[in-house]
Amino acid sequence: MNQKADELRRLLAGDELLVMPCCFDALSAKLIAQAGFPLTFMSGFAASASRIGAPDLGLMSYGEVVDQARAICEAVDIPVIGDGDTGYGNAMNVRRTVRGFARAGCAAVMIEDQLAPKRCGHTPGKEVVGRDEAFDRIRAAVDARAEDDILILARTDARHEHGLSEAIERAARFHELGADILFVEAPKSEAEMREICAALPGPKMANLLEGGETPTLPHEVLAGIGYRIAAYPLTLMAAAMQAMVEALAALKQGPVGPERLMDFAELRRRIGFEDYYATSAAYRSSVRRMG
């Protein structure tokens, strides 16, 4: 059994809203875990920007995405949800994608109904596949789950092109097919968010992109509406990029002041130097004793 999947199931069975900052690499995931958050999501938008310096428009390959997910999972003990995009092909590709994320250590994988190559959920030009193909993707994902334990986060982007009713109907069918978590992307108002949660069973995720189409409601409001997970896909990346741009501008004028920088000792501690030294000391002692 997948211990991370079991931990995610336990979290979803609770009553509190799960606030989920999204990561883009192993270091950002470590910072999320160190801050005490119970889970994280590998944002495809942020991972694409971080790994290949390119927008999230289907440019990263399956292998690159799974490799990024594996590095993240190895760095933290909290459950990680991986972004499986459209599954990278037909239903058989979806099966391979789901099993690949499970074997990389993910607790869950997201599969969506966009037309490949996919687009970020809050950018223009999104299209979705027909219902039959969308349902086949989730059916294949659920079948793969029987072989490698992992939760399925089923996403629909149908709101953009076909309206909220179509998105809700697709998500309801995803639940019937066995999806563990439902994600209707980009509702445009609190009223739409309430309609989604009232209409759909099971755990539901809200995607809260600062400056995006969905209102970033307070946590207590999200919990009251009926969401179980509040995902913040770009908060860390936007904060990190802003800090780096400001530091680079300052560096043109001279050395960057300490007020802009994490203390070097704190930086080493968070990366793991002190843990490494403490663990390796035992082996050095063993070598000395043997000598």
Image (tube, rainbow, N blue to C red):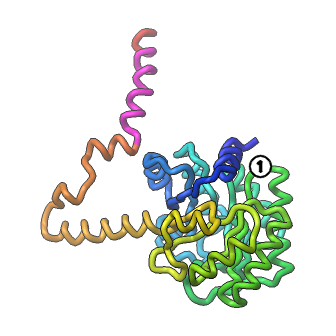
In the rendered view, does 247 fall on the left or right side of 29?
left
Q: Secondary structure at mark 1?
A: loop
Q: Which residue is mark 1?
A: 149
Q: Residue at the location (43% across, 49% down)?
A: 35
- In depth, the one of 101 and 67 nearer the eye is 101
In the rendered view, does 204 fall on the left or right side of 76?
right
- In depth, the one of 260 and 209 nearer the eye is 209
Residue 51 lies, with reference to residue 106, above or below; the image says below
Which of the 4 image quarters holds residue 86? bottom right
Which of the 4 image quarters holds residue 200? bottom right
In the picture, the quarter occupied by the N terminus is top right
Which amino acid type is shown beneath numbered disc 1?
Asp
Residue 203 lies, with reference to residue 79, above or below; the image says below
Q: Residue at the location (83% across, 72% down)?
A: 173
Mostly what secondary structure, the magenta segment? helix
| 10 Å crowding of disc 1: few (<14), some (14-19), many (20+) | many
The percent position of residue 62, horizontal first and vertical second, equals: 67, 65
